[in-house]
């Protein structure tokens, strides 16, 4: 049975230094997605957005370590990307969950309602969700996102989704 808590990279381990913490997380991202790719059902899982932005790091890396927060600008509601510490601390979970998707602690379902490709949801212990997209024509998968699901409404939402789409 998979145990992931020992893979958490605590923000406190960098003495509260955000830049040092990001560099540590980026080393994990490079190890887990650039130097070698995780495998899902016998095929590689790549990451979808290789554009390098802030600090010369891939957009997909930032997507695994931050999230959109709504902000009001004038009368309009916009999104601002900011760090998500809990999500970032669990970056090493992503590959483990993908490669151990048959573990009893992982609920797997495939949502085929997306117009481009089916999306596979790998939900670890109702607390962390990894989403990958099926790229059949290329015989591989793309990592879309991964995040904590610690709010009651999220757990209810994904429980219902998993029942609807379970594979």
Image: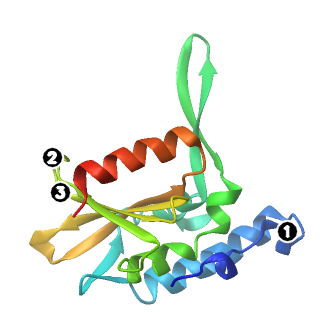
Front residue of this view, candidates 13 and 40: 40
In the rendered image, residue 103, in percent from the top left (x then y), is placed at 41, 80
Give the quadrant of the C terminus: bottom left
Q: Residue furthest top?
A: 75
In the rendered image, residue 140, in percent from the top left (x then y), is placed at 22, 76
Q: Residue at x 57, y 10 (%)?
A: 75
- Left or right, 140 with respect to 146, comes to left
**Residue 30 marker:** none
Q: Residues within 10 Å of mark 2 (few under 14, many from 20)?
A: few
Q: Which residue is mark 2?
A: 115
- Left or right, 141 with respect to 100, comes to left
- What's the CA distance linking mark 2 and mark 3? 6 Å
Q: How is the image coloured?
A: rainbow
- Left or right, 97 with respect to 25, comes to left
Q: Residue at x 48, y 81 (%)?
A: 96
Residue at disc 2, secondary structure: loop
- Left or right, 65 with respect to 155, comes to right
- What's the CA distance linking mark 3 and mark 1? 39 Å
Q: Which residue is mark 1?
A: 12
Q: Earlier in the sequence, mark 3 or mark 1?
A: 1
| 147 shown above or below 160 | below
Q: Residue at x 58, y 77 (%)?
A: 92
**Residue 117 marker:** 3
Q: Residue at x 49, y 83 (%)?
A: 32
Q: Earlier in the sequence, mark 2 or mark 1?
A: 1
Residue contact at pointers 2 and 1, CB within 8 angstroms: no
Front residue of this view, candidates 141 and 79: 141
Residue contact at pointers 3 and 1, CB within 8 angstroms: no
Q: Residues within 10 Å of mark 1 (few under 14, many from 20)?
A: few
- What's the CA distance linking mark 2 and mark 1? 41 Å
Question: Do we see residue 52 in this rendering?
Answer: no
In the rendered image, residue 106, in percent from the top left (x then y), is placed at 42, 70
């Amino acid at each position: 049975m998979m145990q992931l808590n020992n893979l958490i990279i605590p923000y406190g381990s960098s003495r509260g230094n955000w830049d040092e913490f990001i560099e540590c997380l980026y080393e994990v991202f490079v190890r887990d997605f650039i130097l070698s790719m995780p495998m899902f059902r016998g095929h590689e899982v790549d990451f979808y957005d290789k554009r390098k932005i802030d600090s010369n790091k891939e957009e997909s890396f930032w997507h695994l370590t931050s999230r959109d927060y709504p902000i009001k600008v004038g009368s309009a509601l916009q999104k601002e990307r900011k760090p998500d510490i809990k999500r970032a601390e669990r970056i090493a979970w992503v590959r483990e969950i993908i490669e151990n998707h048959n573990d009893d602690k992982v609920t797997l379902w495939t949502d085929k309602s997306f117009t481009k490709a089916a999306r596979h949801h790998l939900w670890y212990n109702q607390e962390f969700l990894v989403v990958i997209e099926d790229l059949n024509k290329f015989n591989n998968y793309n990592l879309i996102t991964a995040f904590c699901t610690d709010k009651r409404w999220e757990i209810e939402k994904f429980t219902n989704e998993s029942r609807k789409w379970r594979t």
